[in-house]
Image (tube, rainbow, N blue to C red):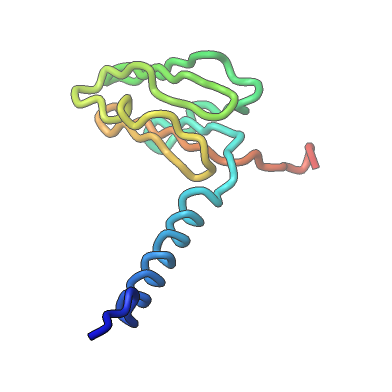
Amino acid sequence: MKRKWITRADLCVLLALLFVVAMLYFLLFSREKGDTVSVYVGNTLHGEFSLADAPDTYTVTTEKGSLTLAFALDGICVLHSDCPDGICVRTGKITRKGESIVCAPLGVCVTLGEATLDGVTG
């Protein structure tokens, strides 16, 4: 009896796997890079920076502690935080539009987006 190398079920599994890989690729790598950082403390905008013109580091001070941000041309990360768990520090660098770093104990949210135009700039 001769055995086939690839059966119809094998082909279906292979096509499904290729579909999942293609979807993950488009979801993870198709977003544009962000160029503006917005820093919120609670619901209040604390600062907004362009990655090209941002300082090397920026410290956000709240009544519960402080958080130090490090800027680079391709993203932003948290260097130090006074929060007890440090999840915001372990988040790493964010580089894509729509990504955020949240420090819940301090109430700080850092969001990467794109520059918005107003009536003056065009």
Q: How many marks?
A: 0
Residue 106, position in %: x, y? 29, 27
Left or right of 7, for residue 69: right
Residue located 34% across and 75% down the image: 6
88 or 121: nearer the eye?
88
Residue located 43% across and 25% down the image: 77
Image quadrant assignment for residue 97: top right
Residue located 47% across and 37% down the image: 111
Residue 79, position in %: x, y? 38, 17
Left or right of 15, for residue 74: right
86 or 20: nearer the eye?
20
* Quadrant of the image containing the C terminus: top right
122 or 4: nearer the eye?
4
Residue 20, position in %: x, y? 39, 64
Name the outermost residue toward the front. 1
Q: Is residue 35 above or below residue 16?
A: above
Left or right of 121, for residue 87: left
Left or right of 56, for residue 103: left
* Quadrant of the image containing the N terminus: bottom left
Q: Is residue 14 above or below residue 70?
A: below
Q: Is residue 122 above or below residue 105?
A: below
Residue located 41% across and 72% down the image: 15
Q: Is residue 21 above or below residue 86?
A: below
Name the outermost residue toward the bottom. 1
Residue 107, position in %: x, y? 32, 31
Image quadrant assignment for residue 50: top right
